[in-house]
Amino acid sequence: MRAEQPGHQHEWLDGAAGPVVRPYTLTGGRVRPAVGGFDLVAFVLAAAGVDPYGQPGLQPEHRRLVECARQPVAVVDLAADLDLALGVVQVLLGDLLARGLVTVHEPPAAAGLPDNDILKAVVSGLRAL
């Protein structure tokens, strides 16, 4: 086994990769949101007039989440837009929700949706037309 040269980089890193940060460092080792859980299709909206840069103790990822949530956006879209793991986004959103910087609008519960048998009957009826 050869010793690495000082300044030697791994083959899988290049100048375009930027800094590599493990997800658990972004969340402080937490894997669950401090406040509730979030459905993947729940909509997030930044609180009106919130300046994420005037808030002490926020990480850059928190600030980016608030900026992206100026318009309603789904949790899964935030993760994709910011290129962060979904679990990381959920933990960071929990922090923002606890501080009142965002609101989360969950989709209606499945109990309020029609039964699968009814939907199948409607589809069958439409096909019969």
Image: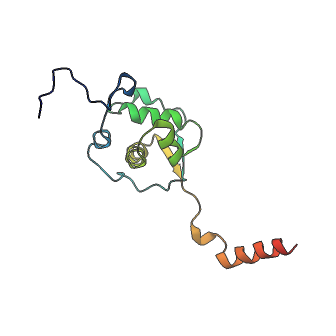
Q: Kindly give the residue lying farthest to the front in the view shown.
A: 1
Q: In which quarter of the image is the N terminus?
A: top left
Q: Is residue 66 left or right of residue 60?
A: right
Instruction: Relative to 67, say whether 90 is above or below.
Output: below
* Left or right for 52, reference 57: right
Query: Residue 64 placed where, x, y %?
Result: 45, 32
Residue 23 in picture, x, y percent from top left = 32, 42
Residue 50 spot, x, y in % from top left: 49, 33
Residue at the image point whose x is 68% and y is 79% from the top: 117
Q: Which of 100 and 8 is in front in this view?
A: 8
List the single residue furthest toward the right.
Answer: 129
Residue at 62% across, 70% down: 112
Of residues 14 and 46, the one nearer the viewer is 14
Q: Which of 92 and 97 is in front in this view?
A: 92
Check the picture and name the quadrant holding the C terminus.
bottom right
Colour convention of the picture: rainbow
Which quadrant of the view contains residue 109? bottom right
Q: Is residue 18 left or right of residue 76?
A: left
> Residue 46 or 27: which is nearer the viewer?
27
Number of callouts: 0
Q: Residue at the spot x=37%, y=47% of the render? A: 91
Residue 120: quarter of image: bottom right
